[in-house]
Amino acid sequence: MNMKRIDILVRKIFRISEYLIPFVISILIGITIMAFTSGNFVESLDAFFLKPFLNEYFIGNMLSGSIPLILTGLAAATAFSSSVFNLGIEGQVYSGAFVSTLIALMLPDQNRWLVWILALFSAFVFGGFIGGISGFLKNRFKVNELISSLLISYSITLFIDYLLENPFLDAGSGLISTATFEDSYMFPKILTPSNLHCGFIIALIVVLIVYVVMKKSTFGFSVNLMGKNTCFSEYAGINTRKLTMTVMVLSGGIAASAGMIDVFGVQGRVIRGFSSGYGWNGIAIALIARNNPLLVIPAALFFSYLDAGAATGALFSDLTPEISRIVQASIFYFITASFYFKFDRKDMKI
Amino acid sequence: MIFDTIISVLISTVSVTTPILLAATGGMYTQTVDELNIGLEGLMLISSFFSIYIFSISGSVLTGVITGIAISVLMSLSMILFRIKLKANIFILGLATNLLAAGLVSFFGVKLLGSKGTVIFGDLSKTTFLLYPLRNQLDFADSFFGNISIFDFMAFAAVGISQYIIFHTSTGIRMRAVGLSKKTAVSVGINTDKNKIMAYMFCGIFCGISGAALSIPVNSFAAGMTNGRGWIALVAVILGRNNPVGIMFAALIFGFSSSLSNILQTGTEISPKILMIIPFMVTLFALIFSSISKNKGKGV
Amino acid sequence: MKSIHCNENSLIIELENIDKVYKANGAHALKNMRLVVKRGTVHSVIGENGAGKTTLMKILCGIEKEDSGIIKINGQNVKISNPSDSYNLGIGMIYQHFRLIEEFTVAENILLGDELPAEVFFLSRKKRKRKIEKLLEDTGMVLEADKKIFDLSVGEKQIVEILRVLNRGAEILIFDEPTAVLGEIETKKLFQLIRNLKEKGKTIIFISHKLREVKEISDEITVMKNGSAVFSGSIDEFNLDFLSSAMSVGDFELKEGCEELPDENIMVIRDLKVIGSDKKTSLSGITLDIKKGEILGITGMSGNGQNVLAETIMGIRKTNSGEIFFKNTDVSGMTIRERREIGMRYVPEDRLKEGVSLESSIAANLVADKIHKREFTMNGSCSFLKLIKVNHVESYANFILKEYDIKCPDVKMPVGMLSGGNIQKVVIAREISDDSEFLVICEPTRGVDLNSTKFVYKKLLEMKKSGFTILLFSSNIEEVLFLTDRISVIYEGKLSEIYRNDKNLDLEIIRKKIAGY
């Protein structure tokens, strides 16, 4: 019994350390680049790695930056854990932001709770609908959802660009964006003067709900089974078509909620192209978190920490902010190596 | 008037098709060995940056293109080596390549060019790569070939070369064998890893040219230069069903609908953004129809 | 190598102390295996399924690597680390499951892997065709070089495999269960071919578990059991009885007779038509009655529509026309889950792909089809809110593990860490350990070790006793003869008439039907 426990512990340590290696390598790559590009190495290390924790303002912004990453990461993780690939997250975020902003603009002087709930709901439904199209195309015509979601996302993005440039353009703002809705509809701020807002708490709650559903419910059981072996789950009696559809709708809905929360927390309007890059970052985070909803939080915080480090690095030293993107991408690259780790040691066999 | 329109549609079709066709041809090799590379976008992006940058320094198109190809091949090979040596998932490696390329390009953009936005290399001579020898007295040929760059020529040549490689050389037959039945390939003594590496090398080469074809003809570079073309190329690979000629037609469908949307942008009042949706929708519908015809009559 | 000509009876292959453990499932396939083959002989290697014959041959072909031991070819120590090494040593294998590319032509398949250096630049179809024609002329075989493989008969496909290794200059030809896929006439042709090859000085290794054939064709024989050689010597030294007791696994013999079957049909299939992936696997009008409480065996070479039929019965494939009744209910419009609800169960052929989810835990695999049932979940109106009682699932899983004698420390471990035999036990346990009464089971012992095979047979016969009806798909005819009450043969999507499995059963008819006559 004791041996067994030690064995399990050893395996766990092995797994965790294996998981951490990519992070260590990537940060080392980042440090190496800093050493070559920076005039004052020590100063830039400090600026990049420690300055994000300098005061409440930086910490708040770092946390605020993680909100859309958490939600898009969650959207991707939900889809990926069932082996359904939603690459249209960016368009879904954009359309969620747009639809929810429309609701807020159309309903002035209302109870803010009513507006929030309506906006979140309609964003979710619209995003879910967009995701659902890909689910439908996959079920009905066997069109690869990876490609269809991407093509639809491009189209939706262009369409919303058009709406922002023409019918909904707020000419006075100087930006290509909608009008700003009233301040009372904005989420309350935390840690002012930073950008952090109550959306952070919503994001955490959503993570928790998704975690419970994915890990504890029969729905989550089916999703995981399908993700690990679609063919088998079908044999075991799971309706994979229905599940594919549900998952695409959920994933699209969560992504669209990210758009709504970003708009109501930070900008108060939709600015053209604001969601650019959200989709790919979300996918990266889901993969780093290995599709585990809870691990999405640290993964998103880490990404946002690197972004914050890039910002403070540029502010307090001579670093190029793009270093963070190289570190992010190389983590991603190295994590792939151990991603599909198989048990090929014979002593672990029974 | 109509004549001019036809010419301009043709020219713009070809110029839109070129980078997509090149990248799709590269992607086809990886599909042939059954390890589809979804990192085409990243390979194109990295090459489009370095080829124009080296071109601007050296003044030689050839040096620029070769550098672009070399870097693209390097990234492509590192993908397949990660796949073979570390058993990494090729799909995730593709996504990683796209992200890494975007990161590298924005980093080097700032470091080397000092700008994150669009950089225009205005003083470079544009005419060096035009196909003057093909010009002649005919109006049509004059106005058509006068606007065809060496890259357009290379894209369609790539189709012919690939058709030849895939179906008429031992390399091609081995790559196809690896993709069709890995077991058979192994048991007749074919080195599957070697063939996969070969396929990724070809992929790197064609994506490298494709990237150069984006930046060099317009003498500029922007971080969003590829703008989803790598993904469209992927659609072309799937639509073309592993056949270079099929892929060419798939890429031409996108190219033609894009050029139609370009023409309509100048000729009508419709918003350009709306018109830009056309090629994506056309591609999506092509995908749907292709899927329908492929699955016709099958059970399940 | 090939040019070395020693005296007639020199040893061409000497294997000493070969040991092999499969890392993937921990199976000890070969233990201290010894094999000595004389030049110019037909040497049979026999033994039951799972005795290690195929592993041994894979080592000779460079597909698997031995853990330890010595390999000598023509008296010289050699290392075979990949298939090319094996070809260079003059060893060629004819696989039971042909290693051919269906989309390629005969010529392309024969020359695959043997392309000339110059062909990197251009591959001349004409030259290749001429090469094949010369090869055909030399060997006296008949084939069309430009035909695609999927247009060939099974016998022709085998010839393509033989030509491939001859083209590579093979001196030693290994035939892995070559007659398993052949009819009587084709078998005779093959034996003639093997004799011709022997006359030309080739050495043949013939792997089989059909004693009659072994007696007919071979000069020498090695009997394998549990990964080692138990006997070796000239064929004349052994008689058939002795051989079969040496191999002794189970008493695979014709049954004395089978009990009277009830008239009640549990399943009735009428004129079932399903389009498969190609013509051979499409079902063209299947009509079948399955009686309550029987084991009905459907045998035939794999790839003749068995999987399509099994999958259609379970609802994984849609029917194009025809009807399937289960207990007088038309099930053809039902989903898989609905069919499971009324008592239909399924063990697919490809267990690792379709029978389990390797990365999921043992517990999850055991309850995969019944997780929504009340005993495992708390109340909840929809699947999002229906929470799983984890401890109930785990205690159920532990109970099953004990019942089926599957040893593992933790039910939370992924199924992929179990051996092939234990995985099969997990699949069967899931499918029969609740109130079901009808089981479709495909190739239940393929790739399963001996002990688990015995366990599976015992379990299936037990189930029959307790009133289960079993539809068994198996290409292993001994297995079908051993287990079933009635037998039908499937060939190119059509079923033969049903034969009662008793002493009046004519095995030759079954063999002919299998070959499509």
Image (cartoon, grey):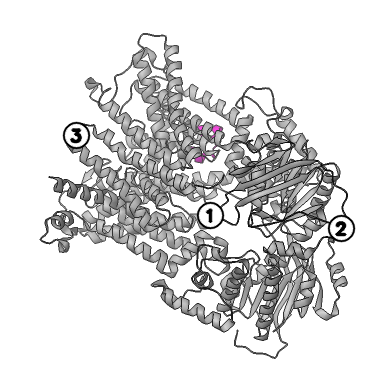
In the image, C79 versus C344, the foreground residue is C344
Q: Which range of residues does the magenta coloring cover?
A: A286-297
Q: Badge 3: how crowded within 10 Å, few (<14), some, or many (20+)?
A: few
Q: Is residue B137 magenta?
A: no
User: What residue is pinned by disc 3?
Assistant: B268
Q: Main secondary structure of the magenta part?
A: helix
Residue C450 percent location from the top left of the image: 79, 58
Question: How far separated are the C-alphas under marks 3 and 2?
Answer: 85 Å
- Percent x, y of residue C59: 66, 69
Above or below, A85 relative to A117: below
- CA gap between label 3 and label 1 equals 54 Å
Task: Decide which of A213, B238 is in the foreground and name it.
Answer: B238
SS for callout 3: loop
Do residues under tags 3 and 1 come within 8 Å of each other at their CB atoms? no
Q: Nearer the viewer, mark 3 or mark 1?
A: 3
Left or right, residue B232 beside residue C390: left
- Chain letter for the residue marked with disc 1 in the picture: B
Numbered disc 1: secondary structure = helix
> Left or right: where does residue C162 sit relative to residue B158?
right
Q: Is residue B66 left or right of residue A235?
A: left
- What residue do we see at 67% from left, 58% from top? C23
Which three-letter amino acid code belongs to the residue tagged 3?
Thr
Whichever of labels 3 and 1 marks the residue nearer the N terminus, that label is: 1
| Chain at tag 3 | B
- Residue under label 2: C255
In space, the residues marked 2 and 1 are separated at their CA atoms by: 53 Å
